[in-house]
Structure formats: structure tokens, C-alpha cells
Image: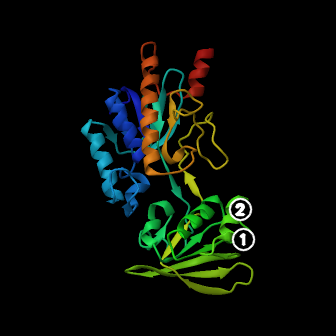
């Protein structure tokens, strides 16, 4: 790696979206580099089992991510294990600044930084992750067939997943800290009509207790009276929000009110040549297969963009940001 190198494509993030983009970038003969500060795979790598990715009836999350990684390495994708701290849009090309101060330049950038589910930050939550605690009903609901589970949250995702789980589990507790849900009226009505769902209003979960075999019960506290009690359950599905990792999204790119990047169908943002994919991008659902599809689409679009830019580009690795270059042009 050298700051004097000019890449065709820089990918930031090594989850399913980023690695797929790397595969398609290399297949398109683009000079491509992927930047990942941690272990490639993203959130999927810490998922115990994956049963809804086409071609695999059941596969461990880490194993699936390793297949993505090995596929990308098969095409000799360059992977830099460093932290990216800023995206610097330019007129002729774009830059990605690393934590060590280095700035990599490319004609196109794909942001695939993903996101994280918000946690309750209570005792037992981390210890029981993958052993009853989950943040994805469509990923893990199957493991709780004919069992009792609890869903925590009051928005659309919590209501939708409570309804989803009610078709699988024997009983679903829907726990919300307020006296009314924030989710849409039609979802609320469906929840009210579902006999397997028991609603617990004005209540927060204060602890998750389990043993070597998984979750056994949760501790609850009434937000109005302070009364405490326990509920026996084998699963806890937490839906109190999802935070996209959007710190690398530069000014000038539109995001919705919850921080997801708005793109066109090619995953391109408001700044030409900068794309957003996977859990960073606003779309109908967050699934591994959709993240991979985003990576494919963005890389194909980036390849087309790069071909239209390379012949007349005067991009230089000078480390200047968009505003600095704009001033130079004006002067």
C-alpha cells in the first residue's frame, strides 16, 4: 500500500456486502482494495447459525463469512487491516483517510460499514448472546419452535417480529416500556388479535438469567409502580433500534432521520462515485442475501462509473478534501 497509488475502487467494510463488492470489483478487473479494521464478516460472523442464505440449509455465521472471504481472496483482493476514519470526496477522485493518517485515493468508493443492533445493556445480555438472546427473529426464530420467547420493543420491527415469532413459538411476551406502541396501527391491530402474544406494557427488562443450556428467565420492572417479577422464557429478542455505522458518510450525502443512507437503485449516493451498501443503506429489510446483492450492484455500477472517468481524470494523491479542491478550482 502506498499513498501514491491510485485505485479504481476502495471498499470500506468487510461484511457480506463489502466482500461481495470486492469479488465483483476484481472480476471487473478494477484495481480494488478493501479496508476492514476487524475480522472480516461483520455482524454475520458472530451469528451462531444461518439457515436462510440460499445454497446452505444450515451453516455457522463465521463459516459463511469465511466462504465470502476465501472467495474474495481467490481473486487476489487486497485487504488492508486498518481503521478508516473519514471519506473525503473530491472532484476528480475520492479519498479515504486511515487512522494512521494515510489517505488512499480512488475513482469510486463503496461504503459497507454496516451497523449494530442497539442493546439493552443489562446483566446477562452479552453472556447469553447466541444462547437465547437474539436481535433477529428471521435469523433465529426457527430455533424456538413451540417454546416461550420474549420480544422487547414497541416499534414496527418489534411488532412485526412478535407476529413472526407467534407463528413459530408457543407463546410470545411482547414487552414495552411505555403504555402504547410506536408501531403502525395495522401492526398493532394484528398484535392485539394474535392469541399467542401477551402484551406487557410499562415494563423494562432489567436482567437476563440463564445457564449452560441458554436463557431460562428474565427479570422485569414496572416503570410506574417499581414492582419487580420474573418471567420464564427460553428466548429474548431485542428490538430497541439499529444504529448504522454512518460516521464515514461525508457531508452532502442524504440520510433518513434514523441515519440510513439514501441511494438510487444502483446504491449510488448524492455524490457521484460514492456508493452505500448493506446495513448502511435504507431498504426494506436487512438480510445477508440483500447485503450481498447490494455489494454486487454497487460494484457493477462502480465499474461503469470508473470506465467513464479514468480516461480524462487528473486525480492526484494530494490528500485534499472536496472543499479544498473546490477552492483550488475557483482560484
Reading the image, the residue beneath label 1 is: 178
Q: Residue at x 65, y 44 (%)?
A: 256
Q: Residue at x 74, y 72 (%)?
A: 179
Query: x and y percent of residue 313 in the render?
Result: 45, 16
Residue 182: numbered disc: 2
Mark 2 neighbour class, 10 Å CA radius: few under 14, some 14 to 19, many 20 or more:
some
Mark 1 neighbour class, 10 Å CA radius: few under 14, some 14 to 19, many 20 or more:
some
Query: x and y percent of residue 113 in the render?
Result: 48, 46
Label 2 or label 1, whichever lies nearer to me, is: 2
- Taking depth in this image into account, of 104 and 181 the one nearest to the observer is 181
**Residue 31 seen from this side:** yes
Query: x and y percent of residue 310 in the render?
Result: 42, 17
- Give the vertical position of 14 relative to 240 (above or below): above
Left or right for 93, reference 324 = left
- Give the vertical position of 327 relative to 77 (above or below): above
| SS under mark 1 | loop
Query: x and y percent of residue 194 in the render?
Result: 63, 71
Q: Residue at x 53, y 68 (%)?
A: 167
Residue 156: numbered disc: none
Amino acid at each position: 500500500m502506498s499513498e501514491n497509488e491510485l485505485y479504481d475502487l476502495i471498499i470500506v467494510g468487510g461484511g457480506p456486502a463489502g466482500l461481495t463488492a470486492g469479488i465483483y470489483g476484481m472480476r471487473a478487473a478494477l484495481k480494488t482494495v478493501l479496508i476492514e479494521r476487524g475480522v472480516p464478516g461483520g455482524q454475520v460472523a458472530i451469528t451462531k447459525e444461518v439457515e436462510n442464505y440460499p445454497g446452505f440449509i444450515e451453516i455457522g455465521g463465521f463459516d459463511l463469512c469465511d466462504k465470502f472471504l476465501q472467495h474474495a481472496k481467490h481473486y487476489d483482493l487486497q485487504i488492508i487491516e486498518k481503521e478508516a476514519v473519514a471519506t473525503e470526496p473530491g472532484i476528480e477522485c475520492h479519498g479515504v483517510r486511515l487512522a494512521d493518517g494515510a489517505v488512499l485515493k480512488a475513482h469510486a468508493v463503496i461504503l459497507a460499514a454496516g451497523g449494530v443492533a442497539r442493546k439493552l445493556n443489562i446483566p446477562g445480555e452479552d453472556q447469553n448472546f447466541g444462547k437465547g438472546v437474539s436481535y433477529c427473529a428471521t435469523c433465529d426464530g426457527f430455533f424456538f419452535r413451540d417454546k416461550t420467547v420474549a420480544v422487547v420493543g414497541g416499534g414496527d420491527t418489534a411488532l412485526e417480529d412478535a407476529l413472526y415469532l407467534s407463528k413459530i413459538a408457543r407463546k410470545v411476551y411482547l414487552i414495552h416500556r411505555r403504555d402504547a406502541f410506536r408501531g403502525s396501527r395495522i401492526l398493532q391491530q394484528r398484535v392485539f388479535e394474535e392469541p399467542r402474544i401477551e402484551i406487557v406494557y410499562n415494563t423494562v427488562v432489567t436482567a437476563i438469567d440463564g445457564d449452560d443450556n441458554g436463557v431460562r428467565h428474565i427479570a422485569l420492572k414496572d416503570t410506574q409502580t417499581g414492582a419487580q417479577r420474573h418471567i420464564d422464557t427460553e428466548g429474548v429478542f431485542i428490538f430497541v433500534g439499529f444504529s448504522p455505522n454512518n460516521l464515514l458518510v461525508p457531508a452532502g450525502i442524504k440520510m433518513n432521520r434514523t441515519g440510513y443512507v439514501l441511494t438510487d437503485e444502483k446504491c449510488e449516493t448524492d455524490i457521484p462515485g460514492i456508493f452505500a451498501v448493506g446495513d448502511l443503506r435504507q431498504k426494506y429489510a436487512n438480510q445477508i442475501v440483500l447485503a450481498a446483492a447490494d455489494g454486487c450492484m454497487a460494484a457493477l455500477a462502480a465499474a461503469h462509473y470508473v470506465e467513464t472517468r479514468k480516461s480524462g481524470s487528473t486525480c492526484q494523491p494530494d490528500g485534499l478534501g472536496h472543499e479544498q479542491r473546490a477552492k483550488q478550482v475557483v482560484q
